[in-house]
Amino acid sequence: MTEHFRTPLELLFERTDLPRFALPAKLAEAYGGGLGFAEPCVVANFVASVDGVVALPGESESGHIVSGGSDADRFVMGMLRTCADVVMVGAGTFRKAGDDRFDAASIYPAGAALFAEARRALGLSERPRFAVVTASGNVDPKSPALENGLVVTTARGEAALRPIASSTTEIVALASQRLDVRDVVALLRDRGARVILSEGGPSLFGELVAAGMLDELFVTTSPTLFGRFPNDGRKSLVSGSDLGGKPLELLGLRRDGSHLFSRYAVREKR
């Protein structure tokens, strides 16, 4: 009998007509079925508490705390990064990411060989391109994630970063002083990105949905409660955008213990 790579996620529901990429059998088994996307697409991934908290104040990376250190959540992040041409985040998320290189092996090292095999089979580069979106340019240019990475910014952000950035980091200043996510996505498309994965934060996510740029949303619901009080710095899934009841369609649902893994399509309001 073939040894399991990890305990498989339990498949509770999935639409039968979803695309499937040619992934290694052990990855598909561990995920509880196939994974794929209709290209081109923009996909977002978050972990949220049952009461909707996705980001916490302070310097620590929020996802690990909110997920309770879930191994399955890190595995799903690795799966999504494996399928992505680009992993994109906002500056706030990037500043709290530590030494994360925003590739699959960084978040789930046990799957590194299988993730690499999958990317080769999909005709993708060794690791996804990393892109950080920042109007101010207030990010650490020495972060390992920015080696051969991309900073999408404004003229003032470029002026702040250009003198101190590594020669391997590409800096692109868009014309507007207020970044428009439609321009950001268009820039990534021009560079050949078919599957763009956004990992936050709540402000960038809200802008993507409000602009009609987001196709799918993956949410890990962690069996935790954090609570809220005024001005506590805790953020829910969307920050700074009025989405007016944007409808979602459930595409899939998986389980690992008390953690639920939901996949939604983002639909236009009827």
Image: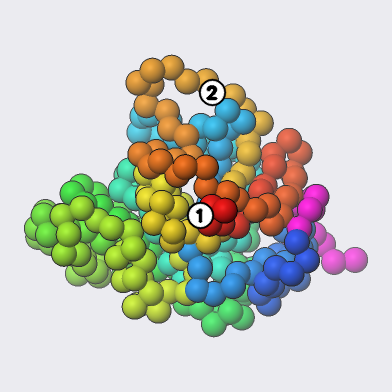
User: Residue at left 33%, top 43%?
Assistant: 92
Place of residue 177 in the rendered image (x, y in percent of width and height, measured from the top left)? 15, 55
Residue that label 2 marks: 226
Q: Give the foreground label among 1 and 2.
A: 1
User: Magenta span has 265?
Assistant: no
Residue that label 1 marks: 44
Place of residue 187 in the rendered image (x, y in percent of width and height, measured from the top left)? 31, 71
Under mark 2, the amino acid is Phe
Place of residue 186 in the rendered image (x, y in percent of width and height, measured from the top left)? 34, 71
Place of residue 249 in the rendered image (x, y in percent of width and height, measured from the top left)? 65, 53
Q: Nearer the viewer, residue 263 or 79?
A: 263
Q: Is residue 65 visible?
A: no
Report helix, strand or loop for mark 2. Answer: loop
Q: How is the image coloured?
A: rainbow
User: Residue at left 52%, top 47%?
Assistant: 246
State whether residue 197 is above or below residue 269: below
Which callout, 1 or 2, points at the residue further toward the start of the chain? 1
Q: Is residue 240 visible?
A: yes
Under mark 1, the amino acid is Ala
Q: Which residues are magenta?
A: 1-14
Q: Answer left or right for 124 relative to 79.
A: left
Q: Answer left or right for 18 relative to 99.
A: right
Report helix, strand or loop for mark 1. Answer: strand
Question: As drawn, which residue projects farthest toward the right?
Answer: 1
User: Magenta span has 13?
Assistant: yes
